[in-house]
Each structure stands twice: as structure tokens, then as C-alpha cells.
Image (cartoon, rainbow, N blue to C red):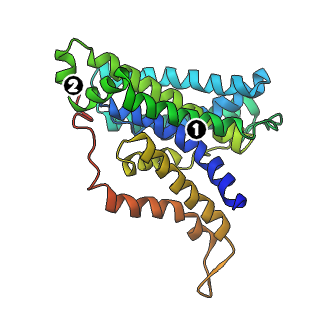
Amino acid sequence: MEEWVFPVLRTATPLVFASMGGLWCERSGVIQIGLEGFMLLGAFFGAFFALALKSVFLGFLGAGLIGAILGGVFGIAVIRFRANQIITGTAINLFAAGLTPILCKAVYGSANSSARVDFTEPLLWGPLVAAGLCAVVSWALFLWTPWGLRMRFAGEHPEALQNAGVSVVRYRWMGVVLAGVLASVGGAMLSVFLSSSFVRGMSAGRGFIALAALILGRWNPGLTVMGCFLFAFTDLMQGRLQGHEWFGIKVADPMVHTFPYAVTLFILAFVMGRSRAPKALGEPW
């Protein structure tokens, strides 16, 4: 049992952070396709700051700061200038995919990987506890606080919120910046917690998987975390199935690698139509 539970929890940690960021952004009414780009930049800058400052904690903090800045840029585009939210999110993903190899080459002399973060031995339970706190706090804010209620109204009934004298724009700004911070910290979990170094393209679609968990969880914090555990389990399964025979047939490893993404597509095909997104999601204000 232990050989499954702890690895699933570790694998789910980046997904929990990214999905909680996506939750607040989309609950405020802004589509967040750019989680993949936030995670990739967070992975690089998490390793960069950890190595430069010799502190894992400062690595996570630096990644969150970069995420906040990029979230602000995203907010300027989609909130201030009302740019198409899907196209802007896609641009962030492409920007991160192109920028991180350039930065890695400039700093570490290789476009493919950074130096190794070799002082992460104490990172056993800390990130798991942080992910759990992130989920619990998000759930509590979502259901039990006026702030969470206003965030939900910004994505469901922005007119009612504005008529009550509360700025819809302010809450949408908080949503996009919070998404940048949490998704970038999730990316730093990949490089500092799971891999001990940055590797080119290491987000490997996890931003989209976090978004799929959000849709599977119907934009609810508790159900979204359960979706993260499901996708983490499928990711672990593909690692365990490599080299094994299925019904007497040896399947090539590249086919096994597609297992988590195939499960993601399968689930979304049957769940997407039944999930109800926030009513004002994607509508400029």
C-alpha cells in the first residue's frame, strides 16, 4: 500500500497547486489555458532561485513571485484590454516553452537541463503538507467566507456583484494573479521537489491535466483534488507498466507513455458535457 500512496501524493502535489490556481481564476470568470506555461516558468525559476540563493524555500517564493508578475501581464491583456482569453493563455504556453530553454542555456550552459539542486533531502513531507493546506484553505475560502462568495459571483453573476457595490474587475484581478502564483509554485514542485533540477519541457502537459482535473471536479475544490489524485495515479501507472506484457503482447514504451493523456481525454469526453462551467466564464467585463 505504501508503495502506491506516497508516490501518488508526490505526483499529485504539482497538480493540486496548479488546479487550485485555475479554480480561482476560472471561478472569477477568466478562462485559464495558460497553466502549462505558468508551471514551466515556475519549474525553471524555482530551480534558479533555489540554486542562486541556496534555499529551497526561497526557490518556491521566487517562482511564486515570477508567477504573480506573469499573472499580472495576463491580467493586463485579458482584463484591461479584453484580449481573447484562450489565445492569450495559449500565447503564455508558447512563450514559456520558447523562453525556458534560452534562459537555461544562458545560465547553465545547456538548453536541456539546469544544475542539480542537491540540498533537497529535507523535502519529504513539507510540500505534501503545503499542497494539503492549499487545498483545505481553498475549500474553506470557497464555501465559508464572503471573499470566496464574491469570487464565485464574479464568475456566475457579475452584474449582481457590481450592483452590490463590489468591483468585479478587482476580484478577477485577484483570480488571475492567484492562478499565476499557485501554478508557478506547482511548477517549482516539479523541479525542486520531484526532480531536483529543471529539465526542458518538464511540465509535460501537467498544466492541461490540472485543467482537466478542474473540469472533472466541476470547479469544486474538493472534487478537483480528487481528480488530481486520479490523474496522478494514472501517471504512476504508466511508469509501472513500462516493460510489461498486456495479454501476452509487449506494448512499446511510447504507447505506455500516452496512458495518462488517453485517460484524460476519455474522462473529459464523458464528463465535459455534464459539467457546468461558471455562467460568465470567458465573458469580458
Residue type at mark 1?
Answer: Gly
Front-most of residues 239 and 66: 239
**Crowd around label 2: few <14 · some 14–19 · many ≥20 (10 Å):** many
Residue pointed to by mark 1: 132
Left or right relative to 126: residue 213: left
Question: Which residue is outermost to the top?
Answer: 165
Instruction: Identify which residue is drawn at 48% across, 50% down.
Output: 226
Front-most of residues 93 and 277: 277
Q: Please say if 239 is above or below 195.
A: below
Q: Which secondary structure lies at badge 1?
A: helix
Q: Nearer the viewer, mark 1 or mark 2?
A: 1
Q: Please say if 200 is above or below 68.
A: below
Residue pointed to by mark 2: 158
Q: Report if residue 231 is visible in the image.
A: yes
x and y, in percent, of residue 20 in the image? 47, 36
Left or right relative to 59: residue 139: left
x and y, in percent, of residue 32 in the image? 38, 36
Disc with the residue nearer the chain's start (1 vs 2):
1
Q: Quadrant of residue 233?
A: bottom right
Instruction: Identify which residue is drawn at 64% across, 43% down.
Output: 200
Q: Please say if 192 is above or below 269.
A: above
Front-most of residues 84 and 143: 143
**Crowd around label 1: few <14 · some 14–19 · many ≥20 (10 Å):** some
Left or right relative to 49: residue 34: left
Number of callouts in the render? 2
Q: Work out which quarter of the rendered image holds the N terminus and state it.
A: bottom right
Q: Which secondary structure lies at badge 2?
A: helix
